[in-house]
Amino acid sequence: MWLPAVTIAQAGEVPCVEVSALHTGGMIQREYAAMEGGRWGEKVDMTMSAIAFREPGSSGLWLFDAGLAAQVEEQREAAPWWFRLALRDVRPGRPAIEQLGPAAQNVSGIVLSHAHWDHLSGVVDFPHVPVYAPERELTWAREQKAGRHGILPALVDSAAARFRAMAAEPRADIDPFGEAGDFFGNGSVLFIPVHGHTPGSLLMLASACDGRRFLFIGDEAWIRRAVQEARKRPWFVRWVADVEAEVIPRELTLVRQLASRLEAVVIPAHDRRAHDAVPEYPSFAGAPRSD
């Protein structure tokens, strides 16, 4: 697989990264629309976010997903009418590039959890930054018509123009998953392939420098309760949202097993409450205190 420049940890150091969340928009959704068997009266605060991570002492930043772009309204207007209807409740916030300010020039690359529009939207704000994902994810996304499975072709084309393919290798330490990609070559960030939501989806396991582990699961589930109960999305959502919906409960069971074994915090991409465990940019989990 492709690897960025490897940083070799000094003797006695445990390889780790600093992690931060950039919330770029959101919406309020009823729980029944987020998971099978969800409660009709329960409201869920949903976020559209990008996760920034960096090696300690480095000014270079990497993003896991790109969040919503500065020109998200233009992207919505270019989508099919029925897709715009589905997106009517999304509230754009401050895009990642605006939140990063001058640090935006330090973004080295964007790794995608998957190619749906709300994860890919912000790549257009970083036109010269490489975009990383498994080859099969890009191939699948380029075959979809506008709106189908949450794909907007213009965004996929933008990513394809600077695409870098990623692959996983067998790893015994990622059990019960069988393989992962070691991003920095030192175990601090692992990308785990899954395929229930899209063919080339990725989970990110990040070991923060404060000793915590975070397992960012993209859209394997939209909310934490769905992970806890291994529930797929309701039928009226999964027909358009998921490629292999029947696989998702099994993959969520593996997520729970891995998180339990490693004592990792599980964070679905859209669950705003779950993101409370991660500092918002410009703060980073695991970064030295400035006072």
Image: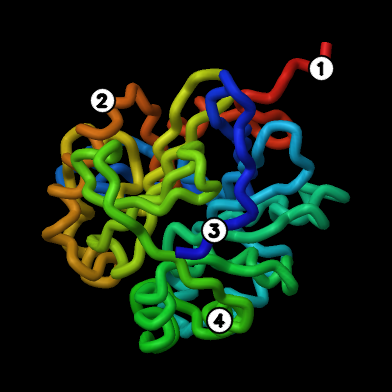
Question: SS of the residue at dot 2?
Answer: helix
Q: Nearer the viewer, mark 3 or mark 4?
A: 3
Q: Quick one: which residue is furthest to the top in this view?
A: 291
Residue 61: image tag: none
Per the model, the C-alpha gap separating discs 2 and 1 is 32 Å
Instruction: Please state which of residues 1 and 177 is positioned toward the viewer in this rendering.
Output: 1
Residue 41 in view in this figure:
no
User: Of the numbered discs in the image, which one, if any, rests on residue 3?
Assistant: 3
Residue placed under numbered mark 1 in the picture: 290
Please give the name of the residue rendered at 72% of the width and 67% of the height, measured from the top-left corner: 126
Q: Could you give the CA–CA distance between mark 1 and mark 3, rounded to whole angstroms?
A: 31 Å
Alpha-carbon distance for marks 2 and 3?
Answer: 28 Å
For label 2, the residue is 260
State the image coordinates of residue 46 (x, y, percent, origin top left).
Answer: 46, 44
The reply, left or right, for residue 261 in relation to residue 189 is left
Quadrant of residue 288 within the rendered picture: top right
- x and y percentages locating residue 279 in the rendered image: 62, 28
Which residue is found at the position 50% from the left and 40% from the top? Answer: 186
Residue 160's mark? 4
